[in-house]
Image (tube, helix red, strand yellow):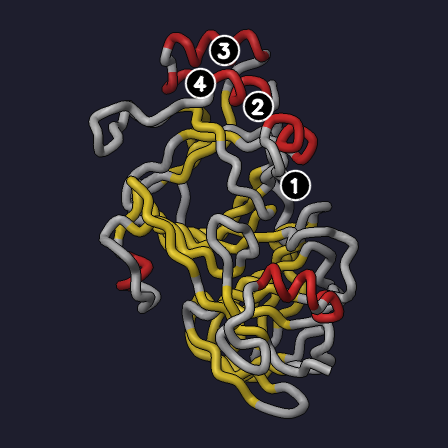
């Protein structure tokens, strides 16, 4: 019986819009001053997590999924379903859209999942904003706006601040704006269709590729505002638990601990990212340390856990957590 958390080494992705906050704010060793993404929990082949503790040290997450299904409650999915990231947007991300599962399997060879995602805002500079949705009433109108380059008329922008949460279903035109640090929980997909990129250039001087036809095909029109209602699950002197979303793709909680908290998770396994502070993870056999920037999985075989200390976490699962 495997009775400890599975800590994972993050994988970093350099991006044209990236910065250095993954180093300055989380203490990560990053590859350059243009590091945009920390893939904290990932079994995707474009950036896969490796276990850094215990008997499974050095094993890839995909190998655990296929070789030790008991750690995940013997799931039915062939591949690990989720991906957890931290994004540092030093500049605006491209305006983009993602396909759903059926569209991804139709348009992209070998892609198992589309991409529904959600964002928890860890930091936001004054005046920071997101693109979330559009104003076109039909595919024809969407196409016309895009061909004219009428981006200010097409795109729906939202001001943001620290602690905000946004649910972004597949088919939603979106973009993270500069000056934001965001924790993203998403389906395990790296399929992105670029709608608009501010005419930015590649290092060779060419414009970055747009995916206009695919973008129009997968975008939902008209846009629907489907933001979930956040709900308080628990509030005591020592712990506060808030449900951010519970959907058919994933459930996500925000946990604040200032003392001791024993969670009553109902999902078979949980993905945890520590976003503030330092905590102890107390199991039946041992105590583990987890501080800001740590990502780990609580496996299905771990029957008892207590969080102790002072910190904040984002917890997610492909199933209901509560």
Residue at left offset 54%, top offset 62%: 314
- Which residue is found at the position 64% from the left and 57% from the top? 243
Q: Is residue 17 visible?
A: yes
What is the CA distance from the residue labelled 2 to the residue labelled 3?
11 Å
Q: Are the residues tagged 2 and 3 within 8 Å (C-beta)?
A: no
x then y, percent, for residue 159:
40, 38
CB contact under 8 Å: marks 3 and 1 = no
Q: Is residue 10 above or below residue 156?
A: below
Numbered disc in front, either 1 or 4? 1
The residue wearing badge 2 is: 219
Q: Residues within 10 Å of mark 2 (few under 14, many from 20)?
A: many
Residue that badge 1 annotates:
112
Q: CA distance from mark 1 to mark 4?
A: 31 Å
Question: Which comes sooner in the sequence, label 3 or label 1?
Answer: 1
Q: Which residue is pictured at 43% across the width and 55% down the height?
A: 86
In the rendered structure, the answer to whether residue 91 lies left or right of residue 219 reads: left
Locate residue 235, reporting x and y percent: 62, 70
Q: CA distance from mark 2 to mark 1?
A: 19 Å
**Residue drawn where x is 58% and y is 80% of the image:** 307
The circle drawn on residue 209 is: none
Q: Which residue is mark 3?
A: 143
In the rendering, at what x and y percent does residue 187 appear? 60, 46
Looking at the image, is mark 2 or mark 1 nearer the viewer? 1
Q: Identify residue for label 4.
A: 154
Mark 4 and 2 residues: CB-CB less than 8 Å, in contact? no
Q: Is residue 164 above or below residue 312?
A: above
Crowdedness of circle 1 by 10 Å Cα count: few (<14), some, many (20+)? some
Q: Classify mark 4: helix, strand or loop.
A: helix
């Amino acid at each position: 019986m495997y009775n400890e958390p599975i800590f994972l080494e993050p994988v970093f992705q350099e991006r044209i819009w990236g910065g250095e906050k993954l180093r300055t704010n989380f203490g990560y060793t990053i590859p350059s001053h243009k590091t945009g993404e920390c893939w904290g929990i990932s079994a995707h082949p474009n950036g896969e997590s490796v276990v850094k503790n215990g008997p499974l040290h050095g094993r890839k997450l995909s190998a655990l999924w296929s070789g030790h299904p008991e750690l995940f409650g013997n799931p039915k999915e062939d591949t690990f379903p989720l991906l957890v990231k931290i994004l540092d947007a030093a500049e605006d991300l491209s305006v983009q859209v993602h396909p759903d599962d059926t569209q991804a399997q139709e348009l992209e060879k070998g892609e198992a999942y589309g991409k529904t995602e959600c964002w928890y805002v860890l930091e936001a500079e004054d005046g920071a904003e997101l693109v979330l949705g559009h104003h076109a009433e039909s595919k024809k109108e969407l196409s016309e706006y895009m061909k004219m380059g009428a981006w200010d008329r097409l795109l729906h922008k939202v001001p943001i601040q620290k602690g905000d949460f946004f649910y972004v279903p597949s088919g939603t035109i979106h973009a993270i704006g500069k000056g934001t640090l965001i924790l993203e929980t998403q389906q395990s997909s790296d399929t992105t269709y670029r709608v608009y990129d501010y005419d930015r250039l590649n290092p060779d001087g060419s414009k970055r590729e747009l995916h206009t036809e695919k973008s129009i095909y997968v975008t939902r029109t008209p846009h629907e505002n489907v933001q979930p209602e956040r709900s308080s699950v628990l509030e005591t002197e020592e712990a506060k638990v808030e449900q951010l979303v519970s959907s058919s793709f994933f459930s996500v909680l925000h946990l604040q601990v200032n003392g001791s908290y024993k969670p009553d998770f109902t999902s078979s396994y949980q993905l945890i990212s520590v976003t503030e502070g330092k905590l102890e993870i107390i199991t039946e056999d041992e105590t583990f340390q987890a501080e800001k920037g740590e990502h780990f999985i609580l496996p299905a075989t771990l029957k008892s856990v207590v969080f102790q200390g002072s910190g904040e976490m984002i917890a997610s699962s492909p199933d209901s957590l509560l």
